[in-house]
């Protein structure tokens, strides 16, 4: 048997990887991918919880998270495209006209 | 008579509403409406005054309507011996202020009149409220019109002065807000208690609070009031505000606004937190004594007449605070009468300075000299008001100062003659700075040619000053008219304080 | 097996009504020529219909769709608030967009969709509903922030909002997962019963902490506030107006419901964290607001500070605090909508006319407008008789009640900073001479909306019982 | 008749109001002057009637209190506007209104043609009103009203010619100085009142004195009360250290100097001490201080008078000196002697001042006696009356000054100490010397002015009549107090005896029955006086060079005297300037502006500046936002974890 | 080590590896490919938890749709080997690494010492719960409302995507 903790630890690790990616990567798309990784890490936890508890709510939530991820992907990529059109870059360091 | 206070309080709003429908070009109509409104308010307040039973220490003409039921906040107004005179003073000075601005304010007149009337509502509300929340609402709301009056119609550095005035006052009152909340909360911690801001309920509860709580709440309230008074060393907003404000603004500021601080001390600090009051009496007495001397000394070396008068306010108000914290009947009665006096005398001084400023567009003492020759009436009136301000017996200032000094000399709470003795030197200094100024402005030869053609006071200006002079003499010769209004209330507070001193604190009583 | 019952439909009728109208609007947008105006009117009607539904359900006290939604009381109250805010923001937006030549029907549809998300937030009895509500609202907001496609600042604003928003969603979701894992449910009504059992579990409390972070981001609490100034500045002004009022109110409404669970248990651990967030929000918001030169950005910092005030109410964990937050949200919504409405009216193409200097002498050029703006500034400062004061009073009262006096003192002291920058607007409008003498043309619709807002803050300031009486059945 | 007492006070007030409100409209000087004069004269008449009635009643029925209304009442404190008519107050009233009427009459002539004619009479009437309040009050508070009131009028009248220069400054400077120095004294009076109220619970004479009888001699409280009161007295009556205002007060019109600065106001201090005699009797230490201060003042002011050249200044210093005598008298417990001198001094000093006024008038406002001389020819009546006054003040036997001064000298010897007598007698000699220096330089010898430009003339009738009346009283005024040793009866002392009975009971004077000693001392002092007269006359009419030689030889001393011991300068350097400088340079410009205001402004600026710096952590790069975000998470989770 | 454990640890290590590699790749295309690998492994892990339906949907949606979209956009914007995207090891990087590891340590600490609700085994119900039938039933009863609302989420996303990415807007 694989204990619940192992899933949770794995999920925590993936989540942290995602956070690290968001914080250090300069490419907006990769940042976005890191966020997807975070969401998936949570999904793993949710499903683990759900199956260990024997309650379907967790799986339902995962289902909705996927929808959200899809929606965000569409919107996020659209935003990146529209930005790219005006600025010809997706480097986050250069996207800083709004500050202070 | 049932709702007389509400009518008094909100009657200026009617004027404001009327003004909304007037074209801003119709200047004289706007003036008449403003003045008429303020006279109506004055009349209504007089009705309250004459219906007031001075022997009764209870709040009179009370009206109470629930406002925010959840926190036991109500629209609760009433007058007692401490407030009735200040209410009448407010309504008395407002029309004068409006008339005084007859010619000097032409720009944005409609807004000006509206702000003055708004200010009147705020001031009256402060004196009439018997609910801490209501009090605070008016206390803060009144800042807005004054802020605009200084900021729009003020002098060169008006913005600095207006912002300083606003933020200074805010700083103090925000802490008071916390104290009000604490007090309400404290009421909810006693058996059967609940959150309340009803002053009458709190009078029964707060004195029973433990020392630690009283101390903090007292400090918060007192800080707020001390800024308003203004007590040394929190006074630096005052000279700026006074100098920059337009004449009527300074007039009202000195006449009424500063009284709100001292009124607050009597109304809230003493009866709510007697134990803390005892503890801090030496501190406050010291500060007020320093204020008396300090204000006078700094006034002495001013070169701007208005600034001089402003610093003299610091000195005079120091007397009032000293009187209040002497916690003797003489002292508090003196403080009450001194509040009125200061309102009349200093107010009149500001009016007079304004009149000369209108003619000469300067207030520098060095720009004048020998005015007695060209403006005899002005000079005579100025002289009388000056004498009132320096406390010449027979005029109003003396009655207040004397009673205050007498009270503080005999105060068991001070435990020392030193306070009164040093404060009494203020009597000397006030003569020094006022007479020196009078001498340089009115006596001597005319040194500036611009001054040769100055016109003496107009009939309107004289008419404006006559009522003030009348009261200056009246209070000086027969102060009983005014002393008796506050006598019973004073006695009650003093007795209460003495009981508290002897450890006879009213226990917190459960609320109904 | 029953999918749903009629009472579920009635209970969720505001959401349903708005959904239906948003679909109609979408269709109209596709089918009708010169559709934007039509879509506007359809949206208005839809919002009004939804308001009607919300009022109708106000007296109910139930849940709908297997305890997913709250019905009546709290939910209806907030529904009306969100809808009113949406309506006002539409009224502000229409003339603005017409002037900017960016008038598309999609705008209104997106506003309606985000409002659907808000309605869900205000009615969420389940963390899933709250999560989805946030997402619906946010996705629409991401798009709206980037609505000026051709403008770099708008793009940037959208990207920042989107990236950080999605980032925070991750944490919120993680929190929900942990709560779920330790209680076996996501339904708030059931979590309450499980709470004592899960109390000692560090995973559980961390779950709440992560939810706190997720909501903290949405309400713009320090240190999760960094997006706010940039996004508010970059987004089109009517969108900013809507985000800062509706968005914040919606996030708070769900925040309050969610946190009523640990707070009803007086969980001091969370109370303290919230208090620290509140304190830092008040400090930073007011402190940094001091040196802003752009009015929109200044209001963004002010928005952070106000989030701090409202968190004070949350930290107090009393019903007084909840009432305070609710009232504050109402007053803040009216005040900010009014202020942004004025900014929107005076703004010029390419984000010009947004600095203090541009407001110099406004009182002479447009006395009415200046007076309204001054009212909003005083209300934000918290000066009676405007509504902002009563809200603050309640919030700080709740803090004092919960032994958080230090927080209340901290709050009032930092609000002193804010006095300075709110007053600066007044100073420029009233005490300075105009540098610009161009004639100002005011769109009637926006102006009327601003007046209604002003009347609102005055009315609620003088008669707060109007709101508080409604709350009796809510808390 | 006693019930008419309020009218004594009211009448001048009425005059004040009429002239004050309508004086300017009434162009006619005669009417204005008459109103003013009549207002005071009618007071005099009422007072006289009361006095006559009083003489006709037994001693114990001579005190009456007439209450008008309650003035100030708060708590346990209460003070009425009430008038106490008794021997002491009626005496003072008579002097005030009597001399006052004469001076009013004189002023009609003297002020003729002045633009401020009506104003002058208004002020004079107000002065009389205040002075009457002072002397007739039945409590200290009302006395204080009069006390400050006379100070005010003094201020107004000294500064009457507000646009003229006076010495180094203006008349305004002199006026202000007078008021402020008076206020310093008033400060003492105020504190004394507080202490009295604190001790006795009242400020009413009757209550206070009745209770005071129960105190024992040497009581500490009494010392302080009386000392503080005496500070008040030094201010009003121009004693060391507060005498500095009186010489400057000569900036006012001469009748003012006569009325206020010679006859009435300056005696208020004596009156107060006499009124409070019982309190003083309980405080022997204060009495001693009073006597010594009086003595010193008498001597030093006299020495300054030696070298002055301004006719009014000489008289002024002589006034200070004479007031010193009076304090010496009351200080040694001879209250009635002090008051006796008050009365006689009022006559001859008023006479002298009015006479000098006539001279100044005649010389077209020239006051320097070095530029006069030989006026005897031009204004014989003035000269005669002036000479009478001078003889009287010099203590020439059988003139009024002789009796009163000798009474004081004798009491100083017996109740004080022999050395006191010696100094006082010496001072009397100095007085005689400088008075006759004055007479000689003014009226005798050669004219030292340009006869072509100045045409001295005799004063008009309205001015002469008062001179004559006063001259008459200067001669006979002393006969009411002829001492027993000269076979007299001293009616004066007897009349006042009941007032001082309480004090005398406490004082318990040793009895001296040595008539020989009294006569011997009297003879000595008369001799000193006569020597002074002779020297003054001889040197300054015939041997001018002696004076010059002495001045040259003792040039240092002369300089000190000429500059009045540099007291004014010392006050300026030690008190006035430091206060002014501290106030301006430190309190205002540094403490107020720099410390308080700058602290506040700096905090505001600091917050704004730091805001401006730290807001830059908002770098605009979204990842830095995320980092802050994560830092927040670390805090939240970390905190919740370690709880 | 049982088979189950073997599978789990294998998948877990590949997941960890692919996640780390995704972070380390300079080229976004490579990152995307590692992420797809990661998602496949996650799908496998779901299977070990008896969540067959979710595992399938996961792969379909994420690997099949979302990541393709990502790749598509990367290609569209031609971001392949952009030199400008060279990562710098600045302060931000250090802070980022420090904070993220801090977060990781905190999370590991919590999960390492806590076992939520004291569950040690998969619930027996888990087998049935993984089926389409079960999920469908729950989704259309208890979770009907959120399910329906997701349509609005998608609608908003579609409108947004069109609004933002369309070449030209017609008024």
Image (tube, rainbow, N blue to C red):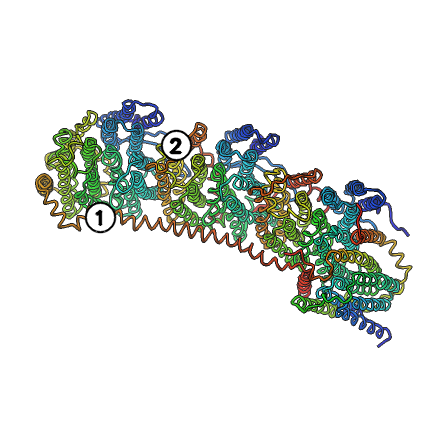
Disc 1 residue crowd, few under 14, some 14–19, many 20+, Cα 10 Å = some
Residue D127 coordinates in the image, percent (x, y): 30, 32
Q: Chain of mark 1?
A: D
Nearest the eye: B500 or B325: B325
Residue C463, by quadrant, is top right
Above or below, comparing residue A53 to residue D389 in the picture = below
Please name the residue that numbered disc 1 is placed on: D565
Secondary structure found at label 1: helix
Residue A41 coordinates in the image, percent (x, y): 78, 65
Residue C312 coordinates in the image, percent (x, y): 64, 53
Q: Is residue C274 visible?
A: yes
Using the image, tell me which numbered label, if any, was put on residue B453. Answer: 2
Secondary structure found at label 2: helix
Disc 2 residue crowd, few under 14, some 14–19, many 20+, Cα 10 Å = few
In the rendered image, which quarter contains the N terminus of chain B? top right
- Mark 2–mark 1 distance (CA, rounded to whole Å): 45 Å
Residue D120, by quadrant, is top left
Above or below, comparing residue A94 to residue B258 in the picture = below
Instruction: Give the side of residue B184 with respect to residue B52, left or right.
Output: right
Q: Is residue D206 visible?
A: no
Nearest the eye: B457 or D428: B457
Instruction: Give the side of residue B186 with respect to residue B358, left or right.
Output: right
Residue C131, by quadrant, is bottom right
Residue B60 coordinates in the image, percent (x, y): 54, 34
Mark nearer the viewer, 2 or 1: 2
């Amino acid at each position: 048997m694989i204990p619940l903790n192992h899933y949770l630890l794995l999920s925590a690790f993936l989540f942290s990887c995602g956070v690290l990616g968001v914080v250090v990567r300069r490419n907006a798309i990769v940042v976005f991918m890191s966020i997807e990784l975070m969401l998936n890490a949570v999904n793993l936890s949710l499903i683990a919880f759900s199956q260990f508890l024997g309650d379907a709510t967790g799986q339902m939530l995962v289902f909705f998270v996927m929808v959200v991820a899809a929606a965000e992907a569409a919107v996020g990529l659209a935003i990146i495209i529209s930005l790219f059109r005006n600025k010809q870059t997706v480097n986050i360091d250069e996207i800083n006209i709004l500050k202070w | 008579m049932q709702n007389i206070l509400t009518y008094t309080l909100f009657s200026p709003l009617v004027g404001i509403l009327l003004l909304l429908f007037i074209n801003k070009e119709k200047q004289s109509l706007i003036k008449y409406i403003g003045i008429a409104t303020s006279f109506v308010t004055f009349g209504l307040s007089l009705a309250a005054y004459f219906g007031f039973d001075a022997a009764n220490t209870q709040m009179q003409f009370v009206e109470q309507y629930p406002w925010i039921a959840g926190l036991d906040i109500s629209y609760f107004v009433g007058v007692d011996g401490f407030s009735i005179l200040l209410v009448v003073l407010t309504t008395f000075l407002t029309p004068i202020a409006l008339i005084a601005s007859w010619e000097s304010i032409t720009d944005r007149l409609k807004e000006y009149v509206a702000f003055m009337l708004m200010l009147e509502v705020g001031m009256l509300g402060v004196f009439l409220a018997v609910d801490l929340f209501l009090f605070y609402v008016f206390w803060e709301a009144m800042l807005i019109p004054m802020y605009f009056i200084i900021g729009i119609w003020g002098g060169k550095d008006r913005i600095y002065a207006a912002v300083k005035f606003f933020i200074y006052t805010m700083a103090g009152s925000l802490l008071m807000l916390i104290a009000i909340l604490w007090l309400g909360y404290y009421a909810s911690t006693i058996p059967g208690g609940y959150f309340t801001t009803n002053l009458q309920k709190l009078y029964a509860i707060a004195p029973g609070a433990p020392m630690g709580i009283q101390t903090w709440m007292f400090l918060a309230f007192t800080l707020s009031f001390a800024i308003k008074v203004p007590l040394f060393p929190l006074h630096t907003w005052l000279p700026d505000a006074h100098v920059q404000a337009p004449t009527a603004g300074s007039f009202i500021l000195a006449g009424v606004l500063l009284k709100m601080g001292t009124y607050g001390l009597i109304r809230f600090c003493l009866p709510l937190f007697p134990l803390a009051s005892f503890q801090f009496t030496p501190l406050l007495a010291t500060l007020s004594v320093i204020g008396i001397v300090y204000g006078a000394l700094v006034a002495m070396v001013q070169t701007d007449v208005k600034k001089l008068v402003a610093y003299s306010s610091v000195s005079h108000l120091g007397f009032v605070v000293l009187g209040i914290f002497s916690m003797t009947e003489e002292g508090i009665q003196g403080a009450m009468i001194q509040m009125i006096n200061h309102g009349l005398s200093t107010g009149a001084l500001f009016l007079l300075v304004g009149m000369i400023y209108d003619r000469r567009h300067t207030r520098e003492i060095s720009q004048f000299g020998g005015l007695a020759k060209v403006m005899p009436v002005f000079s005579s009136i100025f002289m009388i008001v000056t004498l009132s301000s320096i406390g010449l017996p027979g005029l109003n200032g003396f009655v207040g100062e004397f009673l205050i000094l007498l009270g503080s000399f005999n105060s068991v709470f001070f435990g020392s003659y030193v306070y009164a003795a040093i404060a009494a030197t203020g009597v000397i200094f006030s003569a020094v700075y006022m007479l020196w100024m009078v001498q340089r402005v009115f006596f001597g030869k005319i040194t500036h040619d611009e001054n040769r053609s100055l016109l003496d006071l107009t009939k309107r200006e004289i008419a404006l000053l006559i009522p003030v002079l009348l009261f200056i003499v009246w209070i000086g010769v027969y102060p009983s008219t005014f002393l008796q209004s506050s006598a019973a209330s004073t006695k009650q507070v003093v007795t209460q304080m003495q009981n508290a001193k002897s450890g006879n604190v009213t226990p917190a009583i459960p609320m109904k | 097996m029953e999918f749903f019952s009629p009472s579920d439909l009635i209970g969720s009728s505001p959401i349903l009504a708005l959904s239906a109208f948003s679909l109609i609007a979408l269709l109209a947008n596709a089918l009708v020529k010169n559709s934007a105006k039509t879509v506007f009117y359809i949206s208005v009607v839809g919002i009004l219909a939804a308001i009607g539904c919300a009022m109708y359900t106000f007296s109910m006290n139930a849940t709908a769709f297997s305890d997913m939604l709250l019905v009546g009381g709290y939910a209806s109250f907030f529904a009306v608030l969100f809808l009113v805010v949406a309506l006002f923001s539409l009224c502000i937006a229409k003339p603005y967009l017409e002037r900017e030549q960016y008038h598309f029907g999609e705008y209104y549809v997106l506003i309606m969709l985000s409002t659907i998300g808000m309605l869900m937030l205000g009615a969420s009895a389940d963390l899933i509903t709250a999560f989805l509500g946030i997402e619906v609202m946010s996705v629409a907001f991401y798009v709206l922030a980037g609505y000026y496609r051709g403008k770099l600042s708008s793009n940037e604003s959208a990207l920042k909002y989107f990236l950080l928003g999605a980032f925070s969603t991750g944490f919120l979701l993680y929190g929900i997962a942990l709560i779920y894992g330790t209680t076996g449910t996501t339904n708030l009504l059931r979590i309450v019963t499980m709470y004592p059992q899960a109390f000692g579990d560090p995973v559980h409390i961390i779950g709440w902490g992560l939810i706190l972070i997720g909501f903290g981001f949405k309400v713009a609490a320090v240190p999760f506030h960094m997006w706010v100034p940039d996004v508010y500045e970059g987004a089109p002004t009517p969108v900013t107006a809507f985000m800062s009022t509706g968005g914040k109110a919606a996030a708070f409404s769900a925040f309050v419901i969610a946190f009523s669970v640990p707070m009803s248990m007086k969980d001091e651990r969370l109370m303290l964290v919230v208090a620290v967030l509140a304190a830092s929000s008040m400090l930073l918001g007011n402190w940094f607001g001091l040196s802003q030169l752009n009015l929109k950005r200044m209001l963004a910092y002010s928005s952070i500070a106000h989030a701090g005030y409202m968190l004070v109410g949350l930290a107090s964990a009393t019903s007084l605090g909840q009432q305070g937050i609710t009232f504050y949200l109402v007053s803040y919504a009216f005040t900010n909508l009014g202020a942004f409405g004025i900014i929107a009216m005076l703004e010029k193409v390419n984000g010009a006319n947004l600095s203090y200097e541009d407001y110099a002498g406004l009182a002479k050029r447009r006395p009415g407008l200046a007076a309204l703006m001054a009212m909003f500034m005083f209300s934000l400062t918290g000066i009676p008789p405007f509504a902002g004061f009563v809200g603050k009073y309640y919030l700080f009262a709740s803090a004092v009640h919960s032994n958080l006096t230090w927080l209340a003192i901290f709050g009032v002291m930092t609000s002193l900073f804010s006095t300075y920058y709110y007053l600066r607007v007044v100073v420029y409008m009233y005490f300075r001479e105009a540098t610009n003498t161009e004639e100002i043309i005011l769109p009637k619709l926006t102006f009327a909306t601003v007046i209604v807002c002003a009347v609102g803050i005055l009315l609620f300031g003088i008669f707060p019982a109007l709101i508080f009486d409604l709350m009796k059945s809510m808390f | 008749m006693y019930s008419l007492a309020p009218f004594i006070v009211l009448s001048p007030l009425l005059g004040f109001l009429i002239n004050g409100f309508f004086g300017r409209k009434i162009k006619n000087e005669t009417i204005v002057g008459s109103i003013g004069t009549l207002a005071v004269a009618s007071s005099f008449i009422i007072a006289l009637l009361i006095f006559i009635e009083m003489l006709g009643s037994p001693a114990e029925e001579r005190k009456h209190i007439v209450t008008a209304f309650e003035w100030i009442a708060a708590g346990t404190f209460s003070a009425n506007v009430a008038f106490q008519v008794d021997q002491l107050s009626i005496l003072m009233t008579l002097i005030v209104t009597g001399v006052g009427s004469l001076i009013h009459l004189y002023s009609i002539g003297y002020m003729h043609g002045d633009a401020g004619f009506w104003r002058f009479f208004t002020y004079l009437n107000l002065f009389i009103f205040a002075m009457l309040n002072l002397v007739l009050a039945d409590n200290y508070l009302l006395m204080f009203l009069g006390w400050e009131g006379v100070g005010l009028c003094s201020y107004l009248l000294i500064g009457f010619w507000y646009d003229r220069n006076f010495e180094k400054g203006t008349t305004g400077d002199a006026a202000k100085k007078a008021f402020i120095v008076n206020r310093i004294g008033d400060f003492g009076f105020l504190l004394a009142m507080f202490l009295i109220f604190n001790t006795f619970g009242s400020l009413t004479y009757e209550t206070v004195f009745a209770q005071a009888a129960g105190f024992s001699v040497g009581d500490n409280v009494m010392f302080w009360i009386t000392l503080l009161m005496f500070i008040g007295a030094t201010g009003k009556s121009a004693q060391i250290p507060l005498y500095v205002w009186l010489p400057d007060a000569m900036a006012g019109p001469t009748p003012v100097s006569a009325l206020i600065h010679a006859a009435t106001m300056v005696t208020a201090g004596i009156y107060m001490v006499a009124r409070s005699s019982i309190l003083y009797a309980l405080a022997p230490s204060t009495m001693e201080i009073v006597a010594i201060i009086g003595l010193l003042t008498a001597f030093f002011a006299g020495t300054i008078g030696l070298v002055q050249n301004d006719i009014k200044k000489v008289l002024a210093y002589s006034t200070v000196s004479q007031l010193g005598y009076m304090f010496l008298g009351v200080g040694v417990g001879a209250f009635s002697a002090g008051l006796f001198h008050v009365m006689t001094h009022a006559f001859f000093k008023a006479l002298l001042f009015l006479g000098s006024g006539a001279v100044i008038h005649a010389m077209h406002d020239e006051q320097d006696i070095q530029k006069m001389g030989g006026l005897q020819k031009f204004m014989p009546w003035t000269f005669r009356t002036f000479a009478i006054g001078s003889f009287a003040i010099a203590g020439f036997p059988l003139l009024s000054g002789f009796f009163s001064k000798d009474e004081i000298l004798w009491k100083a010897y017996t109740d004080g100490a022999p050395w006191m007598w010696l100094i006082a007698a010496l001072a009397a000699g100095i007085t005689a010397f400088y008075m006759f220096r004055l007479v000689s330089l003014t009226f005798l010898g050669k004219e030292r002015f340009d006869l072509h430009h100045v045409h001295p003339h005799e004063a008009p009738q309205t001015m002469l009549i008062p001179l004559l009346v006063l001259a008459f009283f200067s001669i006979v005024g002393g006969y009411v107090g002829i001492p027993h040793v000269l076979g007299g009866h001293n009616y004066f002392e007897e009349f006042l005896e009941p007032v001082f009975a309480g004090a005398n009971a406490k004082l318990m004077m040793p009895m001296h029955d040595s008539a020989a000693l009294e006569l011997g001392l009297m003879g000595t002092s008369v001799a000193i006086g006569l020597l002074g007269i002779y020297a003054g006359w001889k040197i300054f009419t015939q041997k001018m060079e002696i004076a010059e030689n002495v001045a040259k030889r003792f040039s240092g001393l002369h300089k000190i005297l000429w500059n009045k011991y540099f007291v004014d300068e010392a006050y300026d350097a030690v008190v006035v300037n430091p206060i002014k400088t501290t106030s301006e340079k430190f309190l205002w410009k540094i403490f107020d502006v720099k410390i308080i205001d700058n602290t506040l402004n700096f905090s505001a600026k600091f917050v704004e500046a730091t805001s401006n710096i730290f807001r830059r952590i908002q770098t605009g790069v979204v990842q830095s936002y995320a980092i802050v975000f994560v830092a927040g998470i670390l805090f939240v989770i970390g905190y919740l974890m370690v709880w | 080590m049982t088979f189950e454990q073997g599978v789990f640890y294998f998948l877990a290590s590949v997941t960890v590896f692919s996640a780390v590699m995704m972070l380390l790749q300079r080229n976004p295309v490579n990152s995307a490919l590692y992420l797809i690998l990661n998602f496949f492994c996650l799908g496998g892990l779901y299977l070990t938890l008896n969540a067959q339906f979710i595992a399938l949907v996961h792969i379909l949606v994420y690997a099949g749709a979302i990541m393709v979209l990502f790749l598509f956009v990367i290609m569209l914007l031609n971001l392949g080997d952009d030199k400008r995207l060279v990562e710098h090891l600045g302060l931000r990087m250090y802070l980022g690494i420090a904070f993220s590891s801090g977060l990781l340590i905190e999370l590991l600490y919590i999960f390492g010492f806590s076992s939520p609700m004291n569950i040690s085994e998969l619930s027996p119900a888990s087998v049935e719960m993984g089926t389409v039938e079960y999920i469908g039933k729950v989704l259309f009863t208890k979770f009907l409302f959120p399910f329906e609302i997701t349509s609005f989420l998608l609608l908003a996303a579609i409108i947004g995507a069109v609004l933002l990415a369309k070449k030209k807007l017609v008024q």
